[in-house]
Image (cartoon, grey):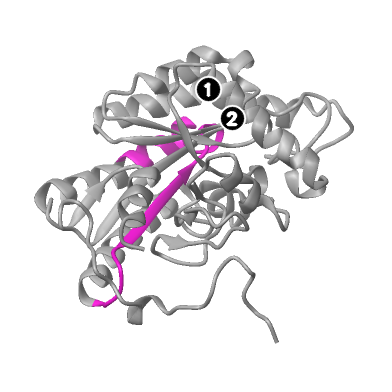
């Protein structure tokens, strides 16, 4: 029985050979990913704060749009205050819809890394044929190349939707990593048809992602913040005590959810905890972006 996809083989994290640490000598890398997303008005997919009615679904669309108009820059201000680098995951449709928001992230002093996130969160690329998916990836990459937002090396599909050839297409188009897979706590190599260097960087789909945590399991803002701190403390401890390669811990945020006033203070509490420990233990914790973990690990994998 074949359990593994063709892209990877099984390897237990704790027994995996390891010949590297993070650039600071640390064992735990932490990054913050901010998903800035656009949703087609009157049709298509989207997270819902209440059961959707007939289109146009004004309630749910406007709740999500609040994230672009208010929440995104409010969240960016918090990251500025804490001097935390950020991975920005924008849909390409936002280049026309709210370019000033993307430009503000690009100016983020501690560093902003651009990660491809499809055209819109109102569609799933796994529902298309191979050529249509290839055209979309090329279109998104070209759209951002014509801006000052910086190079795009990573990808996260809207709704984590993958076809059997998504990683092959990404590798062919010059991408070096994907955030779609949550199968490991370390950077892992994925086998693509063109034999290129293509990797998976861990991205949270459980407690450290505000969509499944807050919208799915209905956790309170305090519970979500506690989960971030608990995961960080435990990951730091196990990354030092266990064998295997250095760990990667991502925190996935959506402004229309986490930047709401009744939630943002709890996120601040969690991120202040992480930055405080990182200052106290710079030899153990690396605050970075997912692409930085990929670039470093790729020289050893």
Asked if one can make out residue 121 in the rendered structure from this viewpoint, the answer is no
Which residues, given as a range, are shown in magenta?
242-268
Find numbered disc 2 in the image and state the secondary structure of the residue it sits on: helix
Question: As drawn, is 112 to the left or to the right of 175?
Answer: left
In which quadrant of the rendered view does residue 187 lie?
A: bottom left
Residue corresponding to mark 2: 141
- Report x, y in % for residue 224: 44, 52
Q: Check disc 1: other Cα within 10 Å, few if <14, some if 14-19, many if 20+.
A: few
Relative vertical location of residue 272 with respect to residue 277 in this rendering, above or below: above
Front-most of residues 260 and 160 = 160
Query: In what quadrant of the picture does the N terminus appear?
Result: bottom right
Q: Check disc 2: other Cα within 10 Å, few if <14, some if 14-19, many if 20+.
A: many
Question: As drawn, is 2 to the left or to the right of 102?
Answer: right
Membership of 243 in magenta stretch = yes
Residue corresponding to mark 1: 145
Question: Tag on residue 272?
Answer: none
Does the CB distance between marks 2 and 1 fall below 8 Å? Answer: yes
Relative vertical location of residue 187 with respect to residue 47 in this rendering, above or below: below
Find numbered disc 1 in the image and state the secondary structure of the residue it sits on: helix
Relative vertical location of residue 109 with respect to residue 113 in this rendering, above or below: above
């Amino acid at each position: 029985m074949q359990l593994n996809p063709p892209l990877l083989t099984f390897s237990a994290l704790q027994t995996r050979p390891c010949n590297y640490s993070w650039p600071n000598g640390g064992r735990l890398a932490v990054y913050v990913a901010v998903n800035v997303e656009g949703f087609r008005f009157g049709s298509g997919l989207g997270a819902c704060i209440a059961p959707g009615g007939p289109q146009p679904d004004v309630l749910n669309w406007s709740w999500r749009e609040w994230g672009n108009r208010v929440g995104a820059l409010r969240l960016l201000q918090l990251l500025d205050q804490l001097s935390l680098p950020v991975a920005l995951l924008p849909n390409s449709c936002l280049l026309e819809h709210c370019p000033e928001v993307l430009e503000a992230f690009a100016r983020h002093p501690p560093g902003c890394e651009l990660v491809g996130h499809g055209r819109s969160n109102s569609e799933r690329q796994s529902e298309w044929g191979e050529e249509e998916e290839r055209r979309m990836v090329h279109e998104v990459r070209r759209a951002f190349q014509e801006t000052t937002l910086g190079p795009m090396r990573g990808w996260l599909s809207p709704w984590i939707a993958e076809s059997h050839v998504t990683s092959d297409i990404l590798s062919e188009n010059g991408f070096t990593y994907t955030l779609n897979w949550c199968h490991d706590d370390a950077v892992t190599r994925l086998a693509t048809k063109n034999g290129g260097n293509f990797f998976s960087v861990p991205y949270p789909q459980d407690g450290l992602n505000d969509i499944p945590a807050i919208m799915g399991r209905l956790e309170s803002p305090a519970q979500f913040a506690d989960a971030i701190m608990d995961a960080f403390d435990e990951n730091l401890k196990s990354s030092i005590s266990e064998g295997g390669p250095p760990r990667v811990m991502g925190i996935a945020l959506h402004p229309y959810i986490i930047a709401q006033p009744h939630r943002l203070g709890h996120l601040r509490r969690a991120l202040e905890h992480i930055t405080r420990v990182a200052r106290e233990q710079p030899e153990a914790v690396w605050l970075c972006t997912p692409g930085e973990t990929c670039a470093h690990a790729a020289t050893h994998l």
